Amino acid sequence: MNLASTLQSHAARSAMTAWQRSLIGLGIAWGLLLVIFRQDAADMVGIWWNSSTFNHCLLIVPVLGWLVHQRKDQLTALTPQSWAPALMYVAIGAFGWLLGDAAGLAVARQLALIMMLQGAVVLTLGPNVARGLLFPLFYMFFLLPIGEEAVPILQTVTAQMCMTMLDWVGIPAHLDGIFITTPTGYFRVAEACSGVKFLVAMMAYGVLVANLCFNSWPRRCAFLAVCFVVPILANGVRAFSTIYIAHFQGIEFAASLDHVVYGWVFFGIVIALVMAAGWRFFDRRPDADAFDPDMLQGPVRYILNIKQALGALLLIALVPFGWSAYVAARSSPVPDRIVLPAVAGWKVVPYLPNAHWTPRFVGASHYLSGRYRNAAGQEADLFVVVFDRQSEGRELVGFGQGAVDPDGHWSWSANMPAPSSGRAERIKTEGAARHVVSFYRVNKVTTGSAARVKLATLQARLFNGNQQAVAILVSAEDEPDAPARPAVDAFVSALGDIDKVADRFAGLR
């Protein structure tokens, strides 16, 4: 064996040793992060498994493995090196986790965990390898269960598209928010009919196809635009078709057809049509290399040994986790019992609604409700909920919390003009409607804004403020001869200073 062969053999063994060392380090780094933030990881997997909107995330995990395997030959031509600047990205993720935990935003904590996992890859493998893994690292963001926040907008868009198409075919219809009335019956564009689950899955699929099948960025952007618009339009057609068939064949037949034919079968056809339309514009060979390793291999500065990298990562991850545990241990007592307040000019009467309604606040320390009537005959319902502190699953605002129970029969219909520091909305169920005004009180802040609630919660958790949180909801039923909003406004006015009322319920006054 000549000297050149010996040197090449030694270099190959060194490279292999570097890869083995770096992969072991990456495995330890991911293991540490997943153990420390195991609750967020478990919650994320639970959402993938239990929510049909995010079932596709279960497929993204093996897709990520396939994307890495697809780059195996090119990656082995690179030399992995632990890289100190990646700790900045890990630190940003850790700080984001702290903010998300303080604000009670599960999705922010989950995003932060994904960022820390991404940062661990760059930290242990280095910038050259990370550039080769750039798309798989980016594609990890699609593991985040986000998108249900768009449900109200998509419900409204779907309902309006239905009305347009019903007008085209000459079927008389009336639209009230997301409720459509035709001569055949009464239809609600429910959360499940908003099309959000397919839109979220279609965007994840579209980004993957754009990377694998296109080189041109204009073509990629055009394809992604189609993947965004077509599912929305297709869902509108699907909802319209259900109403159209119900008009001629009956509601039961339309409902059974919707469950059997539509859903993923219908949208599977839509995916096939989108792919067929984009096929002729594909400009990347299926067997093309993901990247050229010769263009990525370069000198690396600020190298760490693997033990230093893992020690720094562990310290960065433990700091926000430790602070969160310290704040959570602080006492935030609330009264043992709360009672309905005396309201000038109003007296408590039996609760006899046209349609039963109860808002949904999971995990509260106290619930209180009552119906009041004044001398003018106006009636209003008061609902109070008190939290000693907010935590995962026990939040003042969030998906499924508030005036509408997503598992119930009531649905959001429209936002209404809001009073100062409050939120107003109209909700409906078959044969009944309500106006609801909501006030949220956290850390000396009263608001109707979910974002402001989260910010006040964040400030309280970060700076040891008051952890107690209160929601006050005032509601009244719409009657043919007595609209609800005047009764709500009259009761809110008589209730007085909402800040003081909320603080008394929380035991802070």
Image: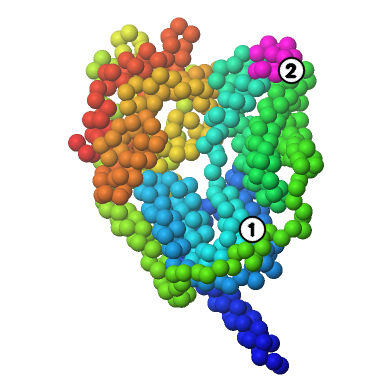
| Outermost residue, bottom side | 1
Q: Count how many numbered circles sit on residues in the image.
A: 2
Residue located at (44% from left, 67% from top)? 84
* Kind of residue at badge 2: His
* Kind of residue at badge 1: Leu
Marks 2 and 1 close (CB-CB < 8 Å): no
Q: Which residue is mark 2?
A: 247
On the image, which quarter does residue 165 sit in?
Answer: top right
**Is residue 491 something one can see in this rendering?**
yes
Spatial separation of the CA atoms under disc 2 and disc 1: 46 Å
Task: Give coordinates of residue 265: x percent, y percent.
Answer: 76, 39
Observer-nearest of 119 and 222: 222
Tell me the quarter of the image containing the C terminus: top left
The reply to whether the magenta stretch includes residue 55 is no
Residue located at (74% from left, 58% from top)? 288
Tell me the quarter of the image containing the N terminus: bottom right
The reply, left or right, for residue 259 in relation to residue 27 is right
Q: Which residues are magenta?
A: 163-173
Task: Give coordinates of residue 197: x percent, y percent.
Answer: 62, 39
The reply to whether the magenta stretch includes residue 167 is yes
**Is residue 227 something one can see in this rendering?**
no
Q: Which residue is mark 1?
A: 64
